[in-house]
Amino acid sequence: MYFVKLTKVNSWVGNDTFSSEELRRYDRQLRILGLERQKKLKDSKVAIVGVGGLGSPIALYLAAAGVGHIKLIDFDKVSLSNLNRQIIHWTSDIGKDKVISAKEKINKLNPNVAVTSIKQALSKDNAEALLSDVDICIDALDNWKSKLLLNEICVKLRKPLIHAGVKEFYGQILVIIPGKTPCLRCIVSEEVIEERGKIPVIGVTPGIIGLLQALEAIKLITGMGELTLNQLILFDGLSMELTKVTVEKNPTCPVCSHL
Ligand SMILES: [Zn+2]
């Protein structure tokens, strides 16, 4: 479908939730979402764990869409070799904490968004406390150890998790609803995971995959469309193919089999 039926913008006037500035800012999407779904975005709190190649487009686009509260979690500082893909950070940010650099850009893009910057690495000691007050967690991490820890905590807290990983021209996405869908551990064996040091990547790959994560987050919050549940999405940028692979819960999964 190429066209949606447009609603008259005048009908937004008179609401108590959005200022006239917000109504103008979100005009193009209000015509699709309506005030009620836009309010769901405003009322939502999303954790972006990792503010690098994936986290950059996720943070910018969720902020632009009007997600009301974004929690950024990353321990690292901006370095020169980040800048081929981590587009929320600029040359003048080198040496700055990533969560601060990202917060500054979000504030400039959309001052209606509340941003919490957490300069910490996700660990067993802090993960539960950091994630207990958010509605959705987004995996924008760059290593499997942290990804599996995030998965474990999200299952424990029953928080939806939007996982992704990228390498070179390839990416993958998995939307995890604890108790309803397979978790990351159901499909990834700890034994086969090897950390490979610096992962080679073309900057557009995390750009594309991060935006698909942001899209799934917006669908999850607003209830629009169909989420890609029980499906691992595989992206191949070289052949421009997007493949859906059906995945199932592992009945002996050490993380989620008890749900
Ligand atoms: Zn599982």
Image (cartoon, helix red, strand yellow):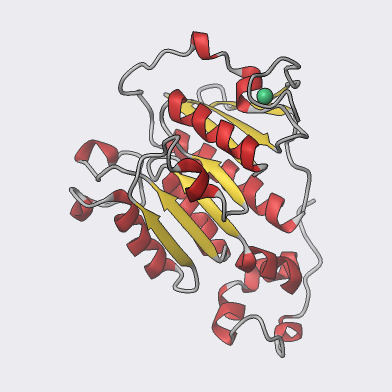
| For residue 36, side relative to residue 242 (left or right) | right
Whether 123 is drawn above or below 33: the answer is above
| For residue 144, side relative to residue 135 (left or right) | left
Point out the residue furthest to the bottom here: 14
Q: Position of residue 38 (x, y in %)?
A: 68, 68
Point out the residue furthest to the front here: 125
Q: How many marks?
A: 0
User: Which residue is depicted at the point 78% across and 75% down?
Assistant: 7
User: Which residue is depicted at the point 74% across and 31% down?
Assistant: 181
User: Which residue is depicted at the point 41% across and 36% down?
Assistant: 123
User: Which residue is depicted at the point 76% across and 30% down?
Assistant: 259
Whether 237 is drawn above or below 105: the answer is above
Q: Nearer the viewer, residue 3 or 187?
A: 187
Q: Quadrant of residue 182?
A: top right
Q: Nearer the viewer, residue 117 or 88?
A: 117
| For residue 216, side relative to residue 144 (left or right) | right
Q: Position of residue 72 (x, y in %)?
A: 43, 52
Q: Position of residue 94 (x, y in %)?
A: 19, 48
| For residue 27, side relative to residue 8 (left or right) | left
Q: Quadrant of residue 5?
A: bottom right
Whether 169 is drawn above or below 96: the answer is above
Q: Position of residue 249 (x, y in %)?
A: 74, 22
Q: Quadrant of ligand 1?
A: top right
Q: Nearer the viewer, residue 175 or 152?
A: 152
